[in-house]
Amino acid sequence: MKFYIEYDIPYHSAVTPSLTDLNSDLPVLFPYPRIYPEQYDYMCDLKKTLEAGGHCVLEMPSGTGKTVSLLSLIVAYQQHYPEKRKLIYCSRTMSEIEKALAELKALMKYRSEQLGIVEEFRGLGLTSRKNLCLHPSVKREKSGAVVDARCRSLTAGFVKEKKERGEDVESCIYHDNLDLLEPHNLVPPGVFTLDGLLRYGEQHKQCPYFSARRMMSFCNVIIYSYHYLLDPKIAERVSKELSKDCIVVFDEAHNIDNVCIESLSIDLTEDSLRKATRGAHNLERKIEEMKSSDEEKLQNEYQKLVEGLRQADEARAEDAFMANPALPDDLLKEAVPGNIRRAEHFVAFLKRFIEYLKTRMKVLYVIQETPPSFLAHLKDLTFIERKPLRFCAERLTSLVRTLELTNIEDYQPLQEVATFATLAATYDTGFLLILEPYESEQATVPNPILHFTCLDASIAIKPVFERFSSVIITSGTISPLEMYPKMLNFSTVLQESYPMSLERRSFLPMIVTRGSDQQTISSGFQIRSDLGVVRNYGNLLFEFAKITPDGIVVFFPSYLYMEQIISMWQGAGILDQIWNYKLLLVETPDAQETSLALETYRTACDSGKGAILLCVARGKVSEGIDFDHHFGRTVICIGAPFQYTESRILKARLEFLRETYRIKETDFLSFDAMRHAAQCLGRVLRGKDDYGIMVLADRRFQRKRNQLPRWIADAMTDGETGLSTDMAVGMAKKFLRSIAQPLPKTSRELSGGKGKDSWSLQDLENVQAERRSRRGEGGHTGRDEDEDRHHDMQGINNQNGTGNGHVEEIDRALEPTSNYMRNGLDEFDEGIDDDELMRMEA
């Protein structure tokens, strides 16, 4: 379908639109004959964000075509306006990247069919060498690290130089062939999926990985993992040439703060320090060998380091061996300090630093200190200054390149030490060093670990917000929206959560707070092991196993609690009862075991009897696996998925958030628990033709339902909260009976068989005309359009009786809750103390 979106004067923008803008509606080609109301509204808000030149946070219901909506709007925007801003689309997993590439390919095919011409357009995905390698012997390696090392040994710049000098060295023909092609035309225009890129590389004998890397600056759309943009150690190599006017999208971004923190956190152990020492000794030996064979190279490196890191790093583009944290520009222009310019001096410097860290590991009590405190202690004992530490990571990279080393996995622990030194010397705030001598409180044998943990998620993402004019953070479960701008320290032009328009109710969310015996159920610390609570949880699962067709997915707060409760169910004979109805399978920390359990689960669901999969709320299954249609008819969250608040790292982060961003500990912990619970619930609903039951089984969910995504909260009436097991089972039976009935004939006739949960082109044009008439002839603002949108959605939902007409009732029901928060308390107060937060605050 083809439709137009009007130019909207952004109410946050100080930019005065040109006459061309005001007279220019954006034509959008959407590759389906019908469009969901929320898809259209999502596109309108995306367009507003691009026109305002700012950032936004958008929450789109699961299974409503978020990816195709986003790609349709942005590609239309690129093709309509002459500057053609590049789209950088970041997602989390390989499956999501491949899905986005397939959607983009289908969209461009549709556009060419409708326009009658093939547009000049390139779309590529980028993933690791292991997934894109064609070299016969290298691609057989199972480890990604080994593939990387062998690839570098065949493609490094010095290998090419040796070959040009006539030396007999092994190289990669696929990589070498790229030098024979035009740099801007390594792959023809079009959209290549990862499989398509592999096939093209095989046909033309050229490396898919380096083809994609070199073509990034010539692409209209780039799709890759978060880490290529957020992890400064990778982004500096892969994404440094991208221009400021790029449009950046972080999809499935509900955990983006954790990705930022992990990218700048390092753990050092005694074993890693021993390996780092071995790496330093190996470097010394290599330096001596080079001195005897080619001392001129070392001398040339020394001269470049005198001029500054920028000059020393010219050759760093695609054969960079080691990843380094991002450094400020002024540091790159400085001359490297004299005491680490010479290779042998630098290695001696590193060895001294490693020995200091080994002595720090010998303490038998917990130490927490800031980077300035650590550096002051380091200087007092070893006379090591701060400045040379800042250059450690880059200096090591330069030395490894000069020595022409390819087996850099041997030097990985040494690189971690150098990265730690650089980060500790670069950042005064937002980081903390925590030295824990024992693995647990009960352990008696020391096994020390030094955590250099990042507390401020905004440090890693700050360069992205500063560099790119429009950054879009979007997901199906990203409520409450206002928490992300606070945590990541950025301002938005727009924050919006969209309701889900449905022809009839296709999912039933419920909050169960009591068992059949009316005993309160919760995974709270005080009562989680109570036999009555465990029995009630088992009875809840048993009752739903009896009535649910096909698959049930159950989520627990942690592996430890899941093992404990399964063991108690086994002893009480509850599992034997459940086995009469469904097969039981369990997720484990082992990836292979979990994959086997998933495969068996899907086979059981396909066979017709169904199965139950027991999982963990922060595990692999809750984040990356979809249970569409018969693979997931019911999802049950047993307990609220709080983090373990006795973790020293979490305590430090909570304190940092409170002092820096005024985010209370209870607010963050309940937000974090609810986003993971919502992520679990969203696993079972993967489209409007899907249906399922969502059960939140914990008394603490009762007061926190306003932190659920809007599309779930709107569908939950007051009568579906505070339920006992018997009431929940009764409602589930009624829902399953109703969903089994065909749509009323009148509904099908009114909508051509599709229902008012989607619009034809005529429907859409009618809605647009109605919105224009409500705004009147005197112009409008973005706020007016928001009101129009809610009016339209409310009317549709009430007309179809989906249950979403209870929005006003819910708002009224939540008024006391809002007052409760304004009084400085939190609705999860009962639940936080189970993790002893009250003692922690005291």
Image: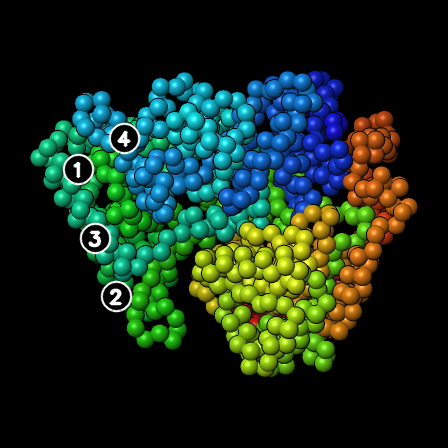
**N-term-proximal mark, 3 vs 4:** 4
**N-term-proximal mark, 4 vs 1:** 4
Cβ atoms at labels 2 and 1 below 8 Å apart = no
Q: Amino acid at mark 1?
A: Arg
Numbered circle sitting on residue 342: 1
Cβ atoms at labels 3 and 4 below 8 Å apart = no
**N-term-proximal mark, 2 vs 1:** 1
Query: Residue at position x 15%, y 39% from top?
Result: 287
Residue that numbered label 2 is attached to: 362
Q: Nearer the viewer, residue 301 or 207?
A: 207
Residue 71 in picture, x, y percent from top left = 62, 33
Q: Label 4 to label 2, Cα distance in Å?
A: 46 Å
Which residue in the rendered view is the most extreme toward the front? 607
**N-term-proximal mark, 1 vs 3:** 3
Give above or below for 740 relative to 835: above
Q: Label 3 to label 4, Cα distance in Å?
A: 31 Å
Q: Amino acid at mark 2?
A: Lys
Q: Amino acid at mark 3?
A: Thr
- Identify the element where label 1 is drawn: loop
Q: Label 2 to label 1, Cα distance in Å?
A: 31 Å
- Identify the element where label 3 is drawn: helix
Query: Residue at position x 59%, y 57% from top?
Result: 602
Residue that numbered label 3 is attached to: 277
Give above or below for 275 relative to 187: below
- Of badges 1 and 3, the one in the foreground is 3
Looking at the figure, which quarter contains the N terminus?
top right
